[in-house]
């Protein structure tokens, strides 16, 4: 009977240690801050701190349409990620820090959106999601 009780205490102790370790790891992981469209104050602050805002529309075939939101002008149309990156490379080299608003349409899926956010992070572009 006594051996059963000590096994139970060891099991509870191990469970507690694992729980504390999980909470520590999940609390210290980096979190990505993405501005939501409903946060008007945050959006206005971003516009004053940054240069031009571009809307990047894309579909399931990864056809991209890049629009300058201030001037309502089409910047480029690209078929594929390589053309897209070469299209916006000159925009990112300017002195102002442009913001790219990713807008999926049609049958664009979440995986494509996540891939584009990853591309933004690797390329150090400022991207938000519409």
Image (spheres, rainbow, N blue to C red):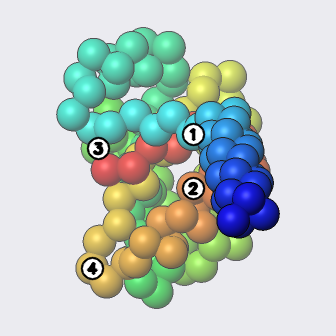
Residue drawn at x 68%, y 58% is 5
Between discs 3 and 2, the one toward the N terminus = 3
CA gap, disc 4 to disc 2?
A: 18 Å
Q: Label 1, label 2: how many angstroms apart (C-alpha)?
A: 10 Å
Residue 66 image offset from top left, x and y in percent: 44, 57
The reply to whether callout 1 and callout 3 are in contact (CB within 8 Å) is no
N-term mark: 3 or 4? 3
> What's the CA distance linking mark 1 and mark 3?
29 Å
> Of marks 1 and 4, which one's residue comes earlier in the chain?
1
Discs 1, 2 touching: Cβ within 8 Å:
yes
Q: Real-space Cα distance between discs 3 and 4?
A: 21 Å
Q: Return the mark for residue 117.
A: 2
Which residue does the numbered mark 4 point to in the structure image?
106
Neighbour class for label 2 at 10 Å: few (<14), some, many (≥20)? some
Q: Is residue 118 visible?
A: yes
Q: Of residues 82 and 16, which is closer to you in this image?
A: 16
Q: Nearer the viewer, mark 4 or mark 2?
A: 2
Count of numbered circles in the view: 4
Q: Dot 3: what SS?
A: loop
Question: Label 1 neighbourhood size at 10 Å, few (<14), some (14-19), many (20+)?
Answer: few
To which residue does mark 1 refer?
32
Mark 1 or mark 4, whichever is nearer to me: 1
Task: Mark 3 vs mark 2: give the one in front.
Answer: 2
Residue at the spot 39% in from the left edge and 49% down from the top edge: 129
| In the image, residue 111 above or below residue 74 | below
**Whether residue 74 can be seen here:** no
Nearer to the camera, 106 or 113: 113
Badge number at residue 72 = 3
């Amino acid at each position: 009977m006594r051996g059963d009780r000590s096994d139970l205490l060891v099991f509870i102790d191990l469970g507690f240690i694992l729980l504390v370790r999980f909470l520590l790891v999940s609390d210290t992981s980096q979190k990505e801050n993405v501005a939501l469209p409903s946060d008007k104050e945050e959006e206005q602050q971003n516009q004053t701190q940054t240069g031009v805002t571009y809307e990047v529309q894309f579909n399931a075939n990864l056809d991209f349409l890049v629009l300058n939101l201030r001037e309502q002008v089409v910047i480029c149309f690209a078929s594929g990620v390589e053309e897209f990156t070469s299209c916006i490379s000159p925009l990112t080299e300017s002195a102002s820090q442009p913001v790219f608003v990713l807008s999926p349409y049609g049958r664009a899926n979440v995986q494509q959106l996540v891939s584009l956010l990853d591309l933004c992070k690797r390329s150090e572009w400022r991207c938000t999601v519409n």
